[in-house]
Image (cartoon, rainbow, N blue to C red):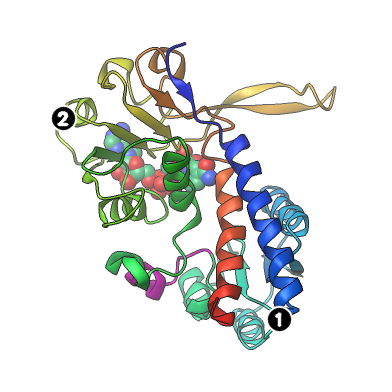
Amino acid sequence: MTAKLIKGTEIREEILEEITAEVAEIKEKHGVIPGLVTILVGESPASISYVTLKIKTAHRVGFKEVQDSQSVDIPEDDLLALIDKYNNDDSINGILVQLPLPKHINEKKILNAIDPDKDVDGFHPVNVGRLMIGGDEVKFPPCTPAGIQEMIVRAGVETKGAEVVVVGRSNIVGKPIANMMLQKGVGANSTVTVVHTGTRDLAAHCKRADILIVAAGVPDLVKPEWIKPGACVIDVGVNRVGEKPSVKNPGKMVAVLKGDVDFDAAKEIAGSITPVPGGVGPMTITMLMKNTLKSLKFKLGI
Ligand code: NAD
């Protein structure tokens, strides 16, 4: 293996320790801790396991965590009233609505009802606009792109003037990370190209990338010959390609996950690369904690 492995699992530990220390310091000086509410509608096992992980992480860093579970048939107006309650709750700095919501609820309406200053997911149009403007305007960068940028910075990869190619143009990964990498400032100032399903020659663009960020959701889409020798490759893709017996829980099956990049071949060409799993994945919840802490700091003016 020639590439340096950028491990999200290790970077997560570093950041969570930094957050824990900062929470303790704020508690000591200001007598308050960050508050995060997680609203879960229904009982989808995937949502429950994701929310459980968020709660566990919030407790670990010393946050107040409120879990608000609602039945799958909650009327839309009741959910809006709940959000209004938390918008006006001084002890809550971050509001998180676990997606997807049941079909009778308009997701957009719900997300747009969250106070932008408590929108720690960074999906509210006000925060999308702030991200577009950049600099001091940015309050809550969306968590997965923020995690990607943090990994690039902590891996010591030069971004200033770098050719960054982003594969994918989704609102949660592709578009925001492209926007973040082109802003002035640390971990950015890059020349950015976004490629997608309408792109004529995907390979030609990828071959130019000093930093290749792939978020397409297509296993092994990026071939090793598309990677510039020495490039930094960030593989955001998480694709279930099968099942295997669990080592931790004998008798149970677990998903076999694969990224969007042919990792085994790519690691012989890239300068640094993220694995799947254990790469970008662990960063998302970590950055959610960081955004919640930021929200309290904005409120305290520190
Ligand atoms: P999406 O389906 O919303 O968007 C995928 C994008 O990739 C689209 O813009 C599409 O144009 C582009 N694309 C798809 N196939 C392509 C192809 N053959 N050639 C060129 N472009 C192509 O997906 P998303 O929500 O952005 O997620 C992308 C992947 O990242 C998924 O595997 C998802 O599971 C993963 N993901 C991981 C995390 C995490 O690790 N925390 C977070 C979000 C998404």
Write down the quadrant of residue 27 in the picture.
Answer: bottom right
Q: Residue furthest right?
A: 250
The image shows residue 137, relative to residue 159, as above or below, that is below
Quadrant location, the C terminus: bottom right
Which residue corresponds to mark 1?
91
Residue at (65, 57) in percent of width and height: 19
Are the residues at dot 1 and dot 2 in contact (C-beta closer than 8 Å)? no
Q: Secondary structure at mark 1?
A: loop
Q: Secondary structure at mark 2?
A: loop
The answer to whether residue 301 is magenta is: no
Circle 2 Cα neighbour tier, 10 Å, few/some/many (<14 / 14–19 / ≥20): few
State which region is magenta.
121-130
Which residue corresponds to mark 2?
201
Write down the quadrant of residue 200 in the picture.
Answer: top left
Visible residue check, residue 170: no
Residue at (62, 35) in percent of width and height: 10
x and y, in percent, of residue 43 in the image: 73, 57
Q: For the residues marked 1 and 2, what is the alpha-carbon distance in whole angstroms?
A: 51 Å
x and y, in percent, of residue 273 in the image: 44, 26
Visible residue check, residue 42: yes
Judge from the rendering whether residue 130 lies leftward or rightward of residue 58; answer left or right.
left
Amino acid type of the residue tagged 2 in the rendering? Asp
